[in-house]
Amino acid sequence: MDPELKKVLEETHALARDNHRMLRAIRRSQVVSLVSTIVVWVAVLALPLYFYQQYLAPTIEQISELSGVPATTTRGLFGLPTSEDLQKLLNSFRAK
């Protein structure tokens, strides 16, 4: 084999190995970025629901028990109170 051709072939092989290494690093970085983005969005969406269930829901239930309006109304969308229920709650607070 011609020495010049062999040198060109070795350089091409070295460039291909380097290119392969860089492409694998880019792909690994993309996967890590995707996983971390998913974890962040799950935390952003799940933590408020958790804190609502742990801290805010019992407080709202205690306040509504004091006012005489039941806290568990499932007439609204997703079990949320309707505007009529909220109006009753406001009226009970205004009356006291």
Image (cartoon, rainbow, N blue to C red):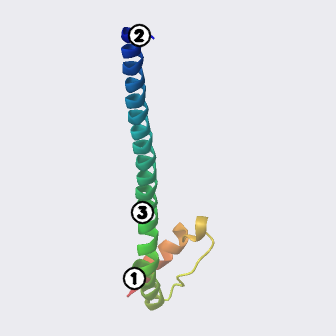
Residue on which the image places disc 1 = 93
Whether residues under marks 2 and 3 lie with C-beta atoms below 8 angstroms apart, the answer is no
Q: Residue at x 44, y 38 (%)?
A: 24
Give the mark nearest the N terminus, 3 or 1.
Answer: 3
Q: Quadrant of the N terminus?
A: top left
Residue on which the image places disc 3 = 43
Amino acid type at circle 1 is: Phe
Q: Nearer the viewer, mark 2 or mark 1?
A: 2
Residue on which the image places disc 2 = 5
Q: Residue at x 40, y 15 (%)?
A: 6
Q: Nearer the viewer, residue 79 or 75?
A: 79
- Please state the horizontal and vertical placement of residue 93, each as a whole percent of the image: 40, 82
Callout 1 environment at 10 Å: few (<14), some (14 to 19), or many (20+)?
Answer: few
Q: CA distance from mark 2 to mark 3?
A: 57 Å
Quarter of the view holding residue 3: top left
- Please state the horizontal and vertical placement of residue 69, each as a whole percent of the image: 51, 84
Q: CA distance from mark 3 to mark 1?
A: 36 Å
Q: CA distance from mark 2 to mark 1?
A: 91 Å
Q: Residue at x 42, y 8 (%)?
A: 2
Give the mark nearest the N terminus, 2 or 3.
Answer: 2
**Vertical arrangement, residue 85 with respect to residue 23, above or below:** below
Whether residues under marks 2 and 1 lie with C-beta atoms below 8 angstroms apart, the answer is no
- Label 1: state its secondary structure: helix
- Please state the horizontal and vertical placement of residue 11, each as a whole percent of the image: 36, 20
The number of discs equals 3
Amino acid type at circle 2 is: Leu
Give the mark nearest the N terminus, 2 or 1.
Answer: 2
Q: Quadrant of the C terminus?
A: bottom left
Q: Residue at x 48, y 72 (%)?
A: 87
